[in-house]
Amino acid sequence: MRHETIFNAPARCPVRVEEQAGQPVRTALAYHRACEFQLILKGRGVYLIGGKKYAFRPNMALAFRPNQAHCYLPAPSGLHAKWRLMFEPAFLKDRTLQRLALAAPTQALLQETEPAAMALLFRQMRDELTGQAQHWREIVRLKLGEFLWLLQRAGARPAPAPAVHPLAQQIAEHLEREFARPLDMDGLARRFGYSESHLAHVFKGHMQISIKQYLFQRRIAEARRQLEESPRVKTSAVAANVGFHHYGLFQRKFRQWTGVTPAAYCRNAHPDCRI
């Protein structure tokens, strides 16, 4: 499994642009401090965002707000091709553009020349970030602004409604608030007025993941964020913070979903980290 920090970019230009293609792989639940946008050129699948399922297809743009947990559920077969853009809103400097970035539509259908125009902007930003010729940061900001205005225009059109199961969404929202506490399925059943088996059936049927596994992934997502943003924190303290009372289980689950140990993850994110 390839290790990747959630969002890691130089402080002087906190922007990352990458082109991705190949066989899609399901991702674990994750979130980051950056705004994230994806331009889908090929492939179909679903993103889970806050208990809602957003289907995507070619010629569609997707937006993920800062600290918004999400995971990717690709279609069973078929290749994908997309551009992925991540940046910290403060980099834009312009408050209007910051508001556009933070309020971008989750889905936007693109028409005519828009996919090609956005792909060109992403390619130009990537080249500027790589070459760093004179005035490259200013040019990246301009390209970001142009992309956000194009997305704003596309977002004004009707887009497919996300698939929502009210009970599954309520469970997801509850787990979001209480993920660091011990999971009490009996208490969850009493809270929502259904049997444990019914809750488990509905949640897995809609989310394509069990309640327990969703909770584990949500805890690991928070652990990743803490390790990235606090290089001196002890991994044992992070485990306790996110709801793991057995450090061995935390290590196993962390490695399962990231491919590395918590200590190695911290070292990769912060070369000066010493644990």
Image (spheres, helix red, strand yellow):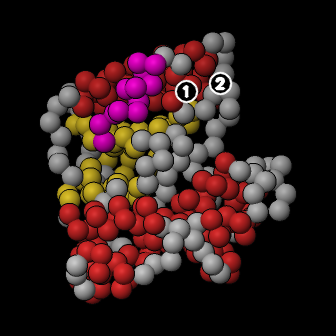
The part of the chain drawn in magenta is 95-106
> In this orientation, which residue lies closer to the viewer: 35 or 108?
35
| Gap in angstroms between the C-alphas marked 1 and 2 | 22 Å
Tell whether 36 sits left or right of 254: left
Give the amino acid type for the residue marked by disc 2 in the picture: Gly
Disc 1, SS: helix
Percent of width and height locating residue 49 = 35, 54
Residue found farthest to the top: 134
Percent of width and height locating residue 189 = 30, 81
Percent of width and height locating residue 249 = 62, 80
Who's the residue at 45% across and 71% down the image?
215
Q: State the predominant SS element of the stretch in magenta.
A: helix
In the rendered image, the quadrant that contains the C terminus is bottom right
Tell whether 56 sits left or right of 226: left
Instruction: Using the rendered view, name the quadrant where residue 114 is placed.
Output: top left
Residue 101 magenta-highlighted: yes
Give the number of the disc on residue 131.
Answer: 2
Who's the residue at 51% across and 30% down the image?
89
Who's the residue at 64% across and 38% down the image?
9
Give the amino acid type for the residue marked by disc 1 in the picture: Ala
Residue 206 magenta-highlighted: no
Residue bearing the label numbered 1: 90
Disc 2, SS: helix
Which label lies toward us, 1 or 2?
Answer: 1
Who's the residue at 65% across and 81% down the image?
246
Q: Is any atom of residue 116 visible in this view?
A: no
